[in-house]
Image: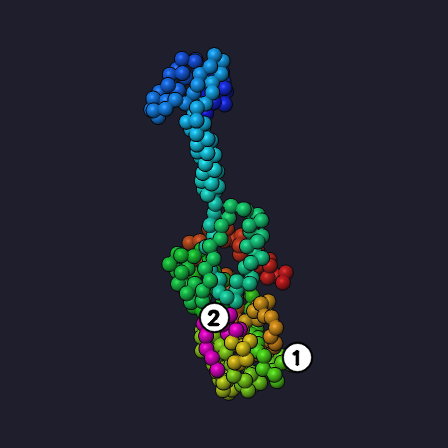
Amino acid sequence: MFREVVDAGSISEAARRMNLSQPPLSYHMKMLEQELGVTLFLRGKKNIELTSAGKLLYERAQTMLSLERAVSREVSKEGKKKTLRIGVTPSTSILLNPVLTRLHEEDENLVFEISDATSFRLRERLEKGMLDCALLRSPLRLDGLDVHPLRKESFIAVGNIDDFCVKGDITLGELADYPLIIYRRYEPFLHNTFNNQGILPSIQAVCDDARTALSMAQSGIGLALLPHSMVQVIRDIWYRTVAENSLETEILFVCRKQSQSNPLIGQLLNLLVETIQDS
């Protein structure tokens, strides 16, 4: 009421605007002054004038009202937010970015929580209900989860070794002449692929992250074997496709079976399929 009185310029005008009788409003103003122990108004015949204490109270009241409105808007906006918890590996996050942009354009209240980890770690988080869905790579056991294959990819060899930097694909036999940098999770798969052709590869380094493998290849340590989608982030380094049909990985959209009813997950999957088909 105090702010209404100040804005109206007099108690009588404030009472009129608020559809109140003047005596109760005057009484409330006197009670406020008694409670604070200060004089807030210098009362004239027609108008009131604020004391320094009254001016301070009015300024603080304005600030508190603005804060109340801001908090109300913030809480209201927060209540409308929807969260989608998505897991990605270093080599599948590339596919997700354009899809998240489209989802945000369609619904600005949608919030993304992105977990970046290995396929094995993300599978564990899915099983524990810590994620709604994830973009993973084969080979990987996914028993009890809902799996949607998106795209098969060949491998590429990446490196700065002089005699490697020529055009054209490279065979497994040719790769055996170079030191190789591989993912730890692909180690059994790659060894089996080489062994099936009677080839003994020279493994120079084993790591857990595509970005680490790429960095080592850029330093000239050896050739990194990476999924083909990593081409999108390769800069200033040579790469060649590995010409071996049995050496491929598949991008998988994975979610918990209980999450299938979530319309956001279905929307995300449809956009991923559409994006991959257009690429």
Which residue is the extreme one toward the right?
A: 167
Can residue 242 be seen here? The reply is no
- The kind of secondary structure element at disc 2 is loop
Q: How many marks?
A: 2
- The CA distance from mark 2 to mark 1 is 27 Å
Residue type (three-letter) at the residue carrying disc 2: Asp
Magenta span = 204-215
Find residue 276 and report its horizontal and vertical position in percent: 59, 61
Does 8 sit above or below residue 72?
A: above
Q: Image quadrant for the C terminus?
A: bottom right
Categorize mark 1 by other alpha carbons within 10 Å: few (<14), some (14-19), many (20+).
Answer: few
Give the quarter of the figure containing the N terminus: top left
Q: Position of residue 48 (x, y in %)?
A: 47, 18
For the point 43% across and 29% down, the residue is: 56
Mark 2 is surrounded, within 10 Å at the Cα level, by few (under 14), some (14 to 19) or many (20 or more) other residues, namely some
Residue at figure coordinates x 48%, y 82% from the top left: 204
- Which numbered marker is on residue 14? none
Q: Which residue is at the front of the view, 179 or 228?
A: 179
Residue 174 against residue 20 in the figure, above or below: below
| Colour style of the rendered protein structure | rainbow
Location of mark 1 (residue): 167
Furthest residue in direction front, as rendered: 52
From the image, tell me which residue sits under label 2: 209
